[in-house]
Image (cartoon, coloured by chain):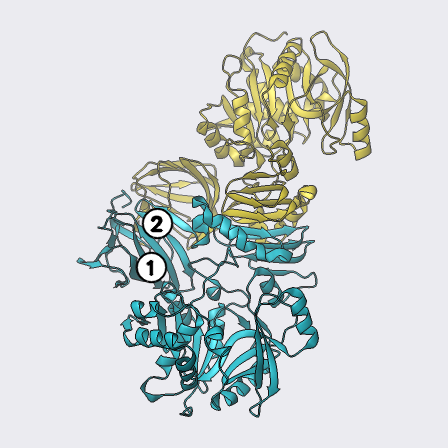
Chain colours: A yellow, B cyan
Amino acid sequence: MTPSPTKIVPIILAGGTGTRLWPMSRAARPKQFLSLISENSLFQDTLLRVSDRAVYDPPIIVTNADYRFLVAEQALEIGIEPGVIVLEPQARNTAPAIAVAALIAGADGHDPLLHVLPSDHAVAADTAYRTAVETAIAAAQEGRLVTFGITPDMPATGFGYIEAGPQEGNGAHAVSRFIEKPDFPTAQAMIAEGGYFWNSGMFMFAASAILEAARQLAPDVLAAAEGAVGQAVHDLDFLRLDADAFAKAPNISIDYAIFEKADTVSIVPAAITWSDLGSWDAVWRASLRDEHGNVARGRTTLIDSTDALVISDNGHIVVDGHKDIIVVASDDAVYVGRLSAAQRVGAAVERLKAHSQTHELTQSHKTMYRPWGGYSSILDGERFQVKRLFVKPGKKLSLQKHHHRAEHWVVVRGIGEIDVDGRTRTLRENESVYIPQGSVHRLSNPGKMMLEVIEVQTGSYLGEDDITRIADEFGRV
Amino acid sequence: MTPSPTKIVPIILAGGTGTRLWPMSRAARPKQFLSLISENSLFQDTLLRVSDRAVYDPPIIVTNADYRFLVAEQALEIGIEPGVIVLEPQARNTAPAIAVAALIAGADGHDPLLHVLPSDHAVAADTAYRTAVETAIAAAQEGRLVTFGITPDMPATGFGYIEAGPQEGNGAHAVSRFIEKPDFPTAQAMIAEGGYFWNSGMFMFAASAILEAARQLAPDVLAAAEGAVGQAVHDLDFLRLDADAFAKAPNISIDYAIFEKADTVSIVPAAITWSDLGSWDAVWRASLRDEHGNVARGRTTLIDSTDALVISDNGHIVVDGHKDIIVVASDDAVYVGRLSAAQRVGAAVERLKAHSQTHELTQSHKTMYRPWGGYSSILDGERFQVKRLFVKPGKKLSLQKHHHRAEHWVVVRGIGEIDVDGRTRTLRENESVYIPQGSVHRLSNPGKMMLEVIEVQTGSYLGEDDITRIADEFGRV
């Protein structure tokens, strides 16, 4: 089967977790949803990189069920309509995610090229990038499984490397071997020798080619993916994979499962301006530095300081007389560390996570406590906000209405009783309700365990003070 | 005239300004009102040091008109009823303030001893302190003007020194000479030689003795003070000095005006645990340090750090891998500097003050903007809050009521129209109104300039969400 001449389908992998960019990244809002090097989030920049509809179809986005509102709202914010947002019931690394996406893209006899893109890297869409994509398309059209290799500019020890072999007729190269994350001398030797490239996590192949390779090399992955897609259900704008079927997929990367074994693999090496933004010093390196080696974002004043990364999402930060420093302030925490030891953030986060008083600082952003429970802010957009509400057993919020915002409530844990304009409904996990502007509504928890609700607010004014209380258990009317 | 056997009257000087402890100290909330080394503010600790009513009368507090609500609320919070709170129309240094207090304490033929205390220093009420006070009382009862000298424990260059002379019969010493802030070699020489003491700013004398000395040595100060007190007006709980009369007082310290010239001056030297807390390194030295030389207050985690001062009034601060560092976070700003260069804060504040976008950060705490103007938080107590409201010309707040709090509004600038339960009043500068719990009220600015109001909220629940709007110009009902 040769690829049909359809457009390329972008496969955006947006399920990653991680807190190495704490305090900005949290379990509930990982790196891909942060604005680190532009006004957009990395996920948004990834979507925009494949938004030319003359070349690309609407993207298939694979994400964790927990991040579905982040994905939907951030796509909406930049005017991108996803082809489908696929929800993984649990994280299973890249091989199952890509198999699922290939099955969906290749359904009904289609066989498009798939361009797989991690959503948490910084990639400059420069000439080197565009040339590499064209070469990858040519090779993928010949049935090759193409990976993109980044020309290294430093002996990094945090990435896998790929040794390129002889050039093929399509312009790509054969792959000599894959190399695990090296130690520093090995990395130095590879840089000195040349011909080694960072494994970028970006791929290009025909849907049929990757599925055929999976059938031969990773049949358990493919079987689980087929089951998960076959029994998937549509939920709002999302395609929710079948949890039981997907749970059978091994937790394995596409590199291990297929690329290191297949004999149809090619590499397109390219000197792309690229960063995995895997730590604060990587963010610093990927950003425009001033003449003192400083990077500052948000409300900041730097005085007599050099080699500083200063980012504020909150108050005004003054850094005075320091060298080799990271200062990052989120709405509820400040990290002050060393730029030359940025990997230490991981240990600091583990330490915070281990203590009950600081655990929540690693999970989500600012938490406000109320008599009925409370809420954490997950995302603030210009005309929307995402919050996580938690309601104690037996408690009710006030009967209320809002003039300037509509709300979308989705129960993610426990059981909720919801009145909207006099109509009462019981919502179980993953059920949702829409509350139009001006509707009189009330949320209560009739159950015996904590109720958790994701609230998506949309409207022109989202202040907490747009609330009219009609009745309240706590005397607040 | 010899002192009558009344109790001692504490004179608390609480009008000082300064931002050397930025971002915690602001023009609107200087050092004396901050909790720096205990749960109480320095001002509160000063009041408590003279709260034994067997020895001391209720204090006379002299402060700036801008700080009167801070003074009143902080005294109330610790259950201290001031004798009188004297409001200076403008700052005129210590000589006029002390002359005014002496006139008030010495009115109606009384002649108490006066114990003058700056309210922005840390003083341990230990045995050395108590012994020194007893000696000072004995000397003051003999008509001496007594100053307290602190035994220096380092060659500080930020204070004036006093050389003590021979001991007198009352236990105090004669004063050989006053020395201006020395350079470092001079300070070292004085420490090595001994017999030199820091000028603490604490004094003890009979009202008659200081007034007589003022009559001879600083008649212009005394005349201005007499005018200001003679034409003072009572305003709420405050005694407001006459502005025109007080403006004639020279801007001069009690040291220059009287102590350096009088021949009845004594010094009580004492090894009191004392700090002027004049900079962040002074706060660090005055605090209990752990075995790594770290001082941490509020929500903090220190990892592999030494010689660190970390204070949070806001989010959780993590300091990781630093030495010689100051990190102080307030509600809207973070200062990250060097403990060994703590005096640099002053220049940083000047820089912020000079820019319109950061100017407000040096003036008051967090500012929230609203359609009608906005408000800054000045002080948060357990059962009270002080805010500065600013209302744009022609704008009105919503017609509203609160269930759990009463409010006291004082117009400090512009003209306000205030409805309370259907009754409308016009308030000009320095006029005030009380809004009981549950009253329906509205504030508006009928004028052509910004209206500024100090709002003191009291009650069991002070959340912004205790508001019921009956009518609103901005559609928020």
Q: CA distance from mark 1 to mark 2?
A: 12 Å
The residue singled out by tag 1 in the image is: B454
Instruction: Tell me what residue is drawn at x 56 percent, y 24 percent.
Output: A229
Along the line of sight, which residue is nearer the eye, A178 or B302?
B302
| Residue at mark 2: chain | B
Location of residue B243 in the rendering, given as x and y in whole percent from the top left corner: 31, 67
Earlier sequence position, callout 1 versus callout 2: 2
Instruction: Tell me what residue is drawn at x 29 percent, y 77 percent.
Output: B230
Along the line of sight, which residue is nearer the eye, B114 or A460?
B114
The residue singled out by tag 2 in the image is: B374
Residue type pointed to by label 2: Gly
- Whether residue A390 is visible, yes or no, is no
- Whether residue A219 is visible, yes or no, is yes
Residue type pointed to by label 1: Ile
**Corner quadrant of residue B58:** bottom left
Mark 1 crowd level (few <14, some 14–19, many ≥20, 10 Å Cα): many
Residue B75 as seen in the image, left or right of residue A324:
left
**Corner quadrant of residue B93:** bottom left
Badge 2 marks a residue whose secondary structure is: strand
Instruction: Tell me what residue is drawn at x 55 percent, y 68 percent.
Output: B276
